[in-house]
Structure formats: C-alpha cells, structure tokens
Amino acid sequence: MAQTTKARLRPLAKTFLESIRQFLTPEVWKQGHQAHNKKNRKCRWEIQPLVMVLVLMTWSCGESQAERFEAAKAFCVACRSKQKRPGGTVPGFQKALARLPIGVLRAIAAGVRGRIAAWLSLEVDGFIPLGCDGSRLRCPRTAELEKHLSGANQQGSPPSIWLTAVVHLRLGVPWCWQWGKGTASERQHLQRMLPLLPAAALLVADAGYIGFELAKELMSKQVSFLIRQCSLVTLDTESQKPLEEFRDGVVLFWTKEARKKGEPPLRVRLLCVRRRKKGETKSQDVWLMTNVMDGRRLSVERAGQYYRWRWENEGFFRTYKRTLNKMKLESRTVKLVHREAEGSMLALQLLLAQGALAMPKRVGKPKPQASPRKILLEIRTEIRSAQAGRRRECFAKRLQRAQREQRQRRTPKERRIWPSRMPHVPPKPPEILKLPAELEAILEAAEQTSP
C-alpha cells in the first residue's frame, strides 16, 4: 500500500531537466562535493557542470568528441543560464576532468543508487534479483595506455580495461560496477562490490563465478546466490542419485585445498533445471548452486526463471557497447580513460533509471520494460532543442511510450558468427560423488568441535 501511494503521489517529469533532477538531487551533488579534494586549485569548471557535460557527451550524437562537447555544453549553459558559465574548449574540459578526483564520480553514483532504491520497486517475491557479469573494453594504442593498461592474454592485443557490473534483472538498471585492467579477475571485482549489495539481494551469475572462496565469502556475508555449475566442480553427497533423476538436493562443496587448510565444507543446495527447446532432442540441463535452503522460498521453477532473467545482464552490455557506442573508449591517457569509463556508466545508469521510472503500471498485466534505444533518442531530441525554446509534450509521457518490443517471436533470432569470438558451448553438469567414509568421519568430528 505504501509503494502504491508513493507511485500515485509522484509527479510526472514535464521536462528532461526535471527527470534528471529526480536522481541528481542536491543531496547527491553534496556527496560529490564532500568527496572532492579541496586542496586542488580552483578552475573555471565546477563539479556540477563538469559532471553534467561528461554525462551529456555520452548521450549526445556526433561524429567527433568536439561535436558532442559543443552539444553538451550548449544544453548545460541553457539549463544554468543564471550561473557561472563553464569553459569553452575541449582541451580545457579534459584538463579539468583529469584534475577531478575519481572518488567524486563514485560518490555521485552512490547517491544515484540511493535514489534508485527510493524511487523504484526492486523486490520480486522477497528477493532483489541482481545479475553479475563482466566484459572487456578496448582503448586507443597510445604509449601511455600500452604501458599501464595490460591487454588481453593474446599477444599483440590492444590496451583494454575490464568492466564488471551488477544489474537488476527485471529493470535492467546497473546497481554498481568495478573497473580494472584487461586481465582483471571478475570474481575479485564481485568480492569488492559485496558491501554495496542490498540486504535482500539474490546474486545470479554464470559458471565464470564458481569457486570455493567466493561461495564461502558470500555465505559468510549472508548474501543469497544462484550460480551455475559446470564439470570443473566436484560435489559430495551423502545419498548419491543418478544425474538423470537428480532435481533438487543438499550437497557438500569441499575442495582439496580447503580440506588441506582444515576448512569445513559448505552445505549448499544443488538444483537442476531441465529445459528442452523446440526442434532439439536433448534437454539443456542447467545446474545451479544456491545457499537458499528453503524450497518454498526458492523453488526449482523459480530458480530457473531467475536464471533466464540473467539475459538482462547480457543486454546491458549490448546497450553500453552498441547503443552508447562504447565498444572502444576514446580517451588517450590513463586518467581520462578512468573518468570516461565512470562517467559513461553513470550516464547509462541515469538513462535506464529514467526509463524504468517512467514505465506505466497496468492492472492485471506485467509492467512493460523500457527500450534503451528509444529513451536515448528522446534524450537526444531534448539536447538538440534546448536552445530553441520549443514547448514539447511532457517528457515522462514520451518516455512511457519508449517500450521494448512486445510481440512474440515465431522463429529464433539468427545466430551470427563473430570472427574474434568462440562459439558458445553449454557447460557440462558438475561431478557428484558419494561422500567417502573417511571424509564422513572428518566431517562428523568437525561438526562436534564447532560451536
């Protein structure tokens, strides 16, 4: 009842600027100012216009960085007509951006995250489903970037950075993210982001996040997870069943390294979601590990639905790389690459949050999902017409029509061959073994000694 009242009393954003201010509130800007190092000398660019131009350049349409800068600066000046004007050149903007502490952008992103939790309904059946995945972004081949940003494992690959993002699986809005070199570990990135997850989070991930140490840390911090397993994982069970009959059961996750260190095993739940696609004779079994032991709270069918929603995480990276054209970053120094990456993620977070907030609620029907491309087109229209002073239809009502395609496909999408990408091979099921007698004795001794 409280969420319904809040949604009913929320006024519609009549303009694009009002829509942005729903998330970039004065409190959020205050957090950015508090994270700023006051020892830096004063410059013409203040924090608010500097960050706004950085975000607007990500949204703007232009063949060069200079064209996008002029469009973003013109919109910023039109919205702040009674305040101090920012600088007028791209080199001056880049120098001011390089002096801006990266913590300022992260503090503003944290403030936006708080506004997302306040405005949007995140829970689904008692969980906040969040997906985690990573992707690599290429950078220019400058001497500085080749020296400090290691490329991929292939010889002769360009400098790159690695992005690991946690995304809400129903709204598609990024919750938090981490950056690293092109060879960074996405598991370590996830471990750093664990303090940022909400209390009711259900972390959904693919087989790239398997590991005893990660599962142990997730359980120690009481974070619910649902991670796909593969043949690299060996699990022990007290009553072994054939893989063809297994569907739901309690298993022990205990690696050899953990046994040597004297660490106790992890008692988890293994689920098998059996699914057969049209035209295929064999079923594509998906094996999922979770620490939610109550089958009534998380059934096998519900777990399968959560994992199918994980495709929203893949769509997020497509939006970032293709819709915002961030397949390759443009900055040519390490400082500017970091700030361009943080600013572009903040811009995408604001874009998707505005779309999720504007989607209408329909009684008896599922809430439609926003189309990132259509929202971006509406924002670009507002940026171009900022100086013209035209009166347009309510911005939130236009966003309500920016919905994804709802038609049901009769044929599957065409699979395209990518020259630099290996064809996807579904993971094989994990190895499930009967717990040996000697390990049973060690386990009983450990349970007796534990408090």
Image (tube, rainbow, N blue to C red):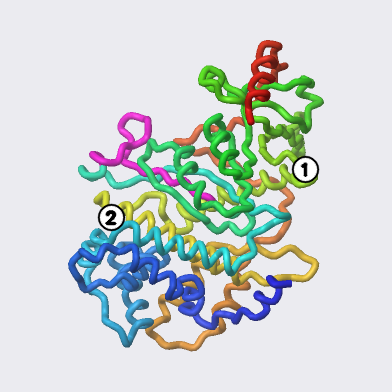
Q: What percent of the width, then of the height, locates residue 212? A: 56, 29
**Residue situated furthest top in the rendering:** 438
Camera-side residue: 214 or 380? 214
Identify the residue shown where x is 31% and y is 41%. Answer: 159
Quadrant of res 294: top right
Q: What percent of the width, then of the height, locates residue 80? A: 35, 82
The amino acid type, in three-letter code, at marker 1 is Ser
Can residue 91 be seen in this snapshot? Answer: no
Q: What percent of the width, then of the height, locates residue 334? A: 26, 49
Q: Is residue 155 magenta?
A: yes
Q: Is residue 399 left or right of residue 94?
A: right
Report how far apart the C-alphas of labels 1 and 2 lie in the structure.
47 Å
Quadrant of res 239: top right
Q: Is residue 284 left or right of residue 313?
A: right
Can residue 447 be seen in this snapshot? Answer: yes
Q: Is residue 77 above or below residue 218?
A: below
Q: Which residue is mark 2?
A: 336
- Secondary structure under the numbered disc 1 in the rendered image: loop
The residue segment tinted magenta is 146-166
Q: Is residue 323 above or below residue 83?
A: above
Q: Which residue is mark 1?
A: 299
Identify the residue shown where x is 46% and y is 78%. Answer: 17
Q: Is residue 167 above or below residue 405?
A: above
Q: Is residue 318 left or right of residue 65?
A: right
Q: Is residue 230 magenta?
A: no
In the rendered view of the protein, which quadrant contains the N terminus?
bottom right
Of badges 1 and 2, the one in the foreground is 1
